[in-house]
Image (spheres, helix red, strand yellow):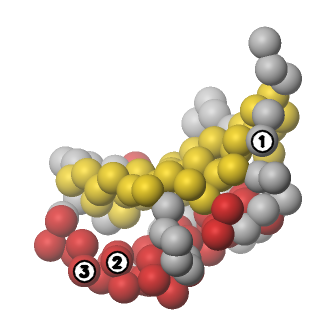
Amino acid sequence: MAEKEIISSPRAPAAIGPYSQAVKAGNLVFMSGQIPLDPATMEVVSDDIEAQARRVMDNLAAVAAEAGGTLDDCVKLTIYMTDLGNFAVVNSVMQDYFQQPYPARATIEVSALPRNVKVEIEAIMQLD
């Protein structure tokens, strides 16, 4: 069995349940879903979808950096949204954080997310 390393960044929100921010196994890093919590206050940043998406991306970037990578090392994203009507806004924010070639992605509408946020994103990152 491959050894696994727990990744934790103080620049991302602490886990709000029994999970790790990320787990590194071999050259893969599995990042838990990030919601738009400010890591300093552990409060939701805003009710605005763009502000929420940007905070989620910043949180993911902090975890990626702690693992030794960047968002450009992500190979797969899963985006959970409470309203796919916000899809274009999240796409626009994603283009500010990722460069081509973009990671594979699935986007799923869900009935609710923790803390009643509008977006949560999890990622898989591959390191060299």
Q: Are marks 1 and 2 in contact (CB under 8 Å)?
A: no
**Residue type indicated by callout 1:** Asn
- At mark 2, the secondary structure is helix
Position of 88 compared to 69: left or right? left
**Residue 45 in view (yes/no):** no
Residue drawn 52% across and 71% down? 101
SS under mark 3? helix
* Residue 27 badge: 1
The answer to which image quadrant residue 92 occupies is bottom left
**Cα separation between marks 3 and 1:** 32 Å
> Cβ–Cβ below 8 Å for labels 3 and 2?
yes
Residue 76 % position (x, y): 50, 52
What is the three-letter code of the residue carrying label 3? Answer: Ala
Q: Is residue 96 left or right of residue 87?
A: right
Residue under pointer 2: 91
Which residue: 35% across, 76% down?
Answer: 90
Q: Earlier in the sequence, mark 1 or mark 2?
A: 1
In the picture, which quadrant includes the N terminus? top right
Can you tell which mark lies on residue 88?
3
Amino acid type of the residue tagged 2 in the rendering: Asn
**In the rendered image of this protein, does residue 105 appear above or below residue 25?**
below
Q: Position of residue 75 (x, y in %)?
A: 56, 54
Q: Nearer the viewer, residue 121 or 28?
A: 28
Label 2: few (<14), some (14–19) or many (≥20) C-alpha neighbours in 10 Å:
few
Q: Is residue 74 visible?
A: yes
Q: Nearer the viewer, mark 3 or mark 1?
A: 1
Q: Nearer the viewer, mark 1 or mark 2?
A: 1
